[in-house]
Image (cartoon, rainbow, N blue to C red):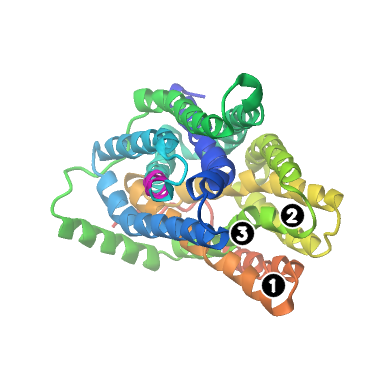
Amino acid sequence: MTKQERSWILQDVGNSAYSITITTAILPVYFKSVAAVNMTDSMSTAYWGYANSLATLIISIMAPLLGTIADFKGFKKTLFSIFTLTAIGSSALLAAAGEGQWFLALAIYVVTAVAFNGSSIFYDSFLTDVTDDSKMDMISSKGFAYGYLGGTIPFVISIGLILSADKVGISTVLATQLAFIITAVWWLIFTIPMLKNVKQIYYIEGKPGQISESFKRLKDTLNETLKNRNVFLFLLAYFFYIDGVHTVITMATAYGIDVGLDSDRLMVILIAIQLVAFPFALIYGALSKKFGARNMIMAGIVTYTIISIYGFFLKTEFDFWILAMLVASAQGGIQALSRSFFGKIIPKEKSAEYFSIYNIFGRVSSIFGPLLMAIVSTITGESRYGILSLILLFVLGMVFFRKVRDGERMEAA
């Protein structure tokens, strides 16, 4: 790998710590048990949901315009730096939200979530700058793979610190606050190579003019996307199957509780998923060389379809372990190859703009899977019918993806 490719991968090692430690595991518990300690469970859960929805709404509105601006010469690196450093700083600042300070905790979290998702758009779009089409699948897969492995390290350190807080003479609250700082420092360390070594190679000449002109360019790009059958069909397929993937990931913990697993065992399974996902993401990247990214994405969709069917019959903890390992075997590969597949069919000089649309499709779609699962579970009275309903998303994704042609890069108008 080149220095630029390694530096790009290391950024995934850094920002994955945020995804695992802050958004998935530690912050939600800290918010409910410390920041919102005097609030009812239902109200604190509602406020947490509002905060996540607000962050998603803000980045969904901002992303297309930011992507349009980032494609001009010299702007992608600047925007990446601003959003990434803001996300890192605000992640550390979460430690300032103490007992009962629920509004401060939510305000800081919204900033971290918006900044993190904004930085991810620019990070993904740098894939076309750091490598060529022949290596894109492998580099993208290595990013996800080492992200799983690297993100687990500060998570395990943080959990160890929290569980042994009494032994080291600090409170559990302080240990949790230190976990936020550990995550931020880890992310900053692995961001330095990206800031130092990666540059924008493909760009549009000139500088962004008035906001109205940027919106006009965005409108033109959306028209290009709708007119280009290949890109549009991929985004449509991605919308459905990645919705199913995200739903399985986000709803797995709640489903595990439904079948009788306690929080400690779920935490162990969560760590195991990250560790197993590491080699399988690399395997997907390696197999894409022999069988092609298209066939490996299809393999991932089929795996998730099997997961939905198996989840219907799940009864014991051992069954849940099997389900978790199936998820681990496919989640990194399907996301990594989807990213590189898209990177190979869009204009390189407009990669930030197109990846902003790509990220919006992924974010907006994540609303419908949990909603579908919730509706079916409510109607039937059993969550196992809810997970079975996700087959619909994977089938639709497969149908549209079969119509996409790989290796056909569109030209910017």
For disc 3, the neighbor class at 10 Å (few under 14, some 14 to 19, many from 20) is many
Q: Which element type, helix, strand or loop, lies under badge 2?
A: helix
Q: Name the N-terminal-most of marks 1 and 2.
A: 2
Asked whether disc 1 touches disc 3, contact meaning CB atoms under 8 Å apart, the reply is no
Q: Name the N-terminal-most of marks 3 and 2.
A: 3
Q: Which residues are magenta?
A: 104-112
- Mark 1–mark 2 distance (CA, rounded to whole Å): 15 Å
Residue 377: percent from left, percent from top: 69, 72
Q: Nearer the viewer, mark 1 or mark 3?
A: 1
Residue 330: percent from left, percent from top: 68, 48
Q: Quadrant of residue 332?
A: top right
Asked whether disc 3 touches disc 2, contact meaning CB atoms under 8 Å apart, the reply is no
Q: Point out which mark residue 256 bears.
A: 2
Q: Amino acid at mark 2?
A: Gly
Left or right relative to 379: residue 70: left
Q: Point out which mark residue 377 bears.
A: 1
Q: Is residue 388 above or below residue 326?
A: below
Q: Nearer the viewer, residue 345 or 336?
A: 336
Q: Name the N-terminal-most of marks 1 and 3.
A: 3
Q: Is residue 113 magenta?
A: no
For disc 1, the neighbor class at 10 Å (few under 14, some 14 to 19, many from 20) is some
For disc 2, the neighbor class at 10 Å (few under 14, some 14 to 19, many from 20) is many
Q: Point out which mark residue 411 bears.
A: none
- Mark 3–mark 2 distance (CA, rounded to whole Å): 14 Å
- Residue under label 3, please give it: 247
Query: Where is the C terminus found, in terms of image quarters?
Result: bottom left
